[in-house]
Image (spheres, rainbow, N blue to C red):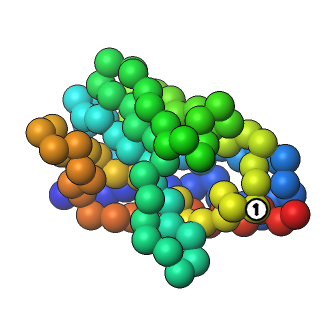
Amino acid sequence: QVQLVESGGDSVEAGGSLKLSCAASGVTFSSRNIGWYRRAPGKERDWVAKITMSGLTSYADSVRGRFTISRDNAKNTVYLQMNGLKPEDTAAYYCNVLNRFTGAPSGSWGQGTQVTVSS
C-alpha cells in the first residue's frame, strides 16, 4: 500500500522560502513520475509541479521561476523548493504518484502540509 507523507509547511512572510518534502513507502519513487498539488481554502486541488523518472520537470504558470521540484531516489523522497512566496501560495500542499498512462494522480492523498504566506 502506497503511503505518502508531506512535511515542511510553515507560516512565512511574503518573499520567504520553504522546502517541502514528500516521503513515500510502498512505492519506489525512482520508477514513477511524481507531482505536487495544492488546495487553497475553498478551492479545488490544483497541480503545481511534476518530475519524471528521468528528472524532467514542469511547472504551473503561477509558480514557474519560483518553485523547484527535485528528487532523491536514494531517500525515496521528492522535494519542492519554494522561493519568493506570495500570499496566493497559501494552501495545503500534497504529493502523489502519477498514473503511467494518463499522468493523473493515482495514489491515495496524504494529509498534506500547510503553507501560509502573510503579506
Q: Is residue 106 left or right of residue 11?
A: left
Q: Is residue 17 left or right of residue 47?
A: right
At label 1, counting other C-alpha atoms closer than 10 Å, the crowd grade (few under 14, some 14-19, many 20 or more) is some
Residue drawn 50% across the image and 60% down it: 38
Residue drawn 27% across the image and 64% down it: 108
Q: Quadrant of the N terminus?
A: bottom left
Residue drawn 76% across the image and 54% down it: 86
Closer-to-camera residue (71/68):
68
Q: In which quarter of the image is the C terminus?
A: bottom right
Check disc 1 and report the residue beneath it.
Answer: 87
Q: Is residue 69 left or right of residue 83?
A: left
Percent x, y for residue 5? 44, 57
Q: Is residue 75 above or below residue 63?
A: above
Percent x, y for residue 25? 31, 49
Q: Which amino acid does label 1 sit on?
A: Pro
Residue drawn 57% across the image and 77% down it: 41
